[in-house]
Amino acid sequence: MQRSFLLNFGLLLVLNLLVKPFYILGIDAGVQDAVGSATYGTYAALLSLSFLLNIVLDLGMTNQNTRHIAQHTHLMGKTVAGSLGVRFVLVVLYALLTVGAALVLGYRGETIALLGWLMVNQALVATILYLRSNIAGAQRYKQDSLLSVLDRVLLIGMMGWALWGRATDAPFRIEWFVWAQTVAYAITALVAYVLVHRLAGGVRPRWQPAFAWVTVRQSFPYALLVLLMTFYYRTDTVMLERMLPDGPTQAGIYAQAFRFFEAFNMLGFLMAGLLLPMFSRLLGERKGDAQPSGLSPLVILALRLVLTGTIAVAVFGIIHAKDIMDLRYSEHTEQSAPVFALLIGCFVAVCTTYVFGTLLTAGGNLRLLNWMAAGGALLNIGLNLVLIPRMQAEGAAWASLVTQVLTALVQIGLARKVFGARVPLQVWVTACLYSLALVGVAVRLGAWDLALLPQLLLFGAAAIVLSFVMGMLSRRVLYEAMELRVPSKP
């Protein structure tokens, strides 16, 4: 399982590093430059609003389905056929609830129309994720990896032409960006459906009330977890846009910083999607209360990889926050730089939860996770109410940092209590020393007055060397995970 994890995570990294950073920092940021921070800030707030209730589109079915298919792959055809019927009903319910929430918040006219298209996109994304959960649950990781970037490849092509290839001088409209997403998501959903249809030996969507009730009942704990976690991931932008006199501009400033965080966070999210079926398969093979022998090694391997990469990203990002913002944006970089420094600090905590939270999800420990997420949501909203009026976008970033660190610590403790997933103290101590060493390297490189790109390349090389020298990674661990023999010393 460790070998499978390394190989497929490597494929995910290559594909997504080739595609998604360019999309987020080139296309998405290019759209913000083209329409302005205020217009993009309104779009970002509407996008966050469409996210807040998108769990209604899924009700936790995707996570529950990944776990189920990983353990019962032969039931895919029946499960998908019944679930697709349920999802059509959920789309209508989601639309009614989201439009109602928008009206309560004061949105009217053109903003409601734009929200309507964003809701269509959310429905397509939820469908894609559900179909991919069947492919990943069936251990078809290569197909799932290719699907993970297909929509972004299509968007890069369409929006690249709209931003830079048009012959006309007509001003760019934010609606073009939203409509291009609709086309890309629809094509990706169709491709995913064809793959699932072949894997399942045929799928005939149908409405089955009894199946729907069982599915909703089993999925509800997953739905509640996603809803609560969405609140402390996505309320920031909506609260900024609604609470402040210059709300759209502050939301746009926050979006500048959040975009870089999101670019890196996608890699952690993809790793969680890879770990969930693996953890589920391992836990499905256990006998009684005994934990499978491969569980702890996989947890520790994933954590070592996470800490090695995320600490390096966080250290460089915090020290060079202003330079990174200036690299991509021409306005509001003084305000967005400290926001980015705080959000990239969250990156370590968030990716740590992608290991331990995914393990708890695979084990079906939803009650504990839901209590944790409820506490995180209340804490984040409370902090935002206090900090946003005083510190604007930076206050929202502080609220995120505090919330993410505390919820990560809780999930580490829960994983240890429930599964005995003990991480040796040596790993945490080494991670702290590795962090300090990287800070020293970054500060030293900054003193050389080099351009940002040479500093990044030198820092990356130093991080790789230090990760092996200090023991964050080792050749023996990687060889054993790949089931290869370590060459004996002469």
Image (cartoon, helix red, strand yellow):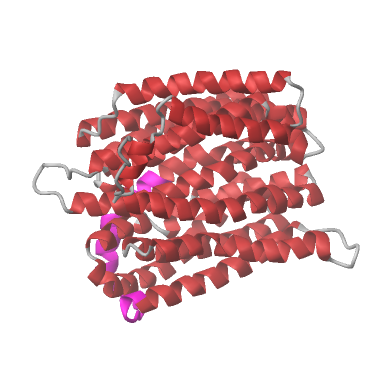
Q: Quadrant of the C terminus?
A: top left
In magenta stretch: residue 222? yes
Q: Residue furthest front?
A: 490
Above-or-below relation of 408 to 106: above
Residue 181, percent across and down? 63, 63
Above-or-below relation of 305 to 135: above
In magenta stretch: residue 126? no
Q: Is residue 346 visible?
A: no
Q: Is residue 261 left or right of residue 381?
A: right
297 vs 72, nearest the viewer: 297
Residue 123, percent across and down? 51, 63
- The prevailing secondary structure element of the residues shown in magenta is helix
Residue at image x 78%, y 33%? Answer: 332
202 vs 123, nearest the viewer: 202
What stretch of residues is rendered in magenta? 199-226
Q: Is residue 458 visible?
A: yes
- Quadrant in the rendering for residue 352: top left
Residue 70, percent across and down? 27, 60
Q: Is residue 110 left or right of residue 21?
A: right
Residue at image x 24%, y 54%? Answer: 281
Residue at image x 47%, y 64%? Answer: 128
Residue 418, percent across and down? 21, 35
73 vs 213, nearest the viewer: 73
Q: Residue furthest right?
A: 169
